[in-house]
Image (tube, coloured by chain):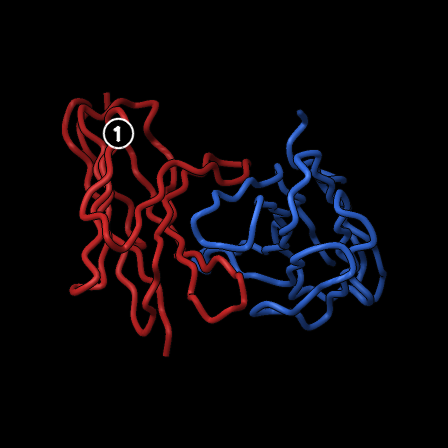
Chain colours: A blue, B red
Amino acid sequence: NAGVTQTPKFQVLKTGQSMTLQCAQDMNHEYMSWYRQDPGMGLRLIHYSVGAGITDQGEVPNGYNVSRSTTEDFPLRLLSAAPSQTSVYFCASREGQGGYNEQFFGPGTRLTVL
Amino acid sequence: SQKIEQNSEALNIQEGKTATLTCNYTNYSPAYLQWYRQDPGRGPVFLLLIRENEKEKRKERLKVTFDTTLKQSLFHITASQPADSATYLCALDPLDSSYKLIFGSGTRLLVRP
């Protein structure tokens, strides 16, 4: 199993550009989520999904959209990039919704917005 | 307000000693608490989970305690090695039916040879 995969690994955008960060998992996990990680701020939840067709907002959803058309894929869209969105983005999945399930993380996407 | 706090200062210890990392939380009542390891440039990796009715959990050189009265978890690495150098994150399920996993900001551990 590849686990959780993310593309691209690195990306530089100009302010106002849009892009999609891709995330896929091959473990048939129902729960998927996106985090951003900034120095001293830890992992902050952007959006999450409890199954195909179901998404909800996390702590910092503004400026990001998500969709979940399949169990495997959970892309994150930046509609109009801003320098404040410069961060490292992690996608994660887990088998179920409960806090007793370990969460598997992707390798991350390092995004710089100029 | 709800908070999860981990020491932001790096913990610097000598190889062979026991490292102890702290996770404190406020205004949460989690049923589970998890610990993860993160190496530079990589995603976090799950290490251990402890339930609220478990006082202690062990896995090889790792030990986690969970004190729901103090609202604190301690993470111990015994006989530490330079390869244990990493950032360690705690996480909890806020049990608000949102199914979120909320993370602390992590503590960096440096083990000197």
The amino acid pointed to by label 1 is: Val
Residue position for label 1: B111
Left or right, A105 with reference to A42? right
* Residue drawn at (20%, 36%) of the image: B19
Residue A107 location in percent, x, y? 61, 37
Position of residue A24 measured from the top left corner of the image (x, y, whole percent)? 74, 40
Q: Quadrant of residue A108?
A: top right
Q: In front here: A73 or B81?
A: A73
- Residue furthest to the bottom in view is B1
Is A10 displayed left or right of B88 in the figure? Answer: right
Most foreground residue, A114 or A101: A101
Q: Residue at x 24, y 42 (%)?
A: B64
Front residue of B46/A113: it is B46
Total numbered labels placed on residues in the image: 1
Quarter containing the N terminus of chain B = bottom left
In which quadrant will I find the C terminus of chain B? top left
Q: Residues within 10 Å of mark 1 (few under 14, many from 20)?
A: many
Where B53 falls versus B69 (above or below)? above
Looking at the image, which is closer to me, B98 or A64? B98
Q: Position of residue A26 (x, y in %)?
A: 71, 34
Quarter of the image where one finds residue B80: top left
Q: Which quadrant of the figure has residue A81? A: bottom right
Under circle 1, the secondary element is strand
Above or below, B56 against A112 in this view is above
Image point (69%, 50%), residue name: A111
Q: Chain of mark 1?
A: B
Name which residue lies at 16% across and 65% down.
Answer: B69
Residue situated furthest left in the rendering: B17
Q: Position of residue B83 (x, y in %)?
A: 34, 23
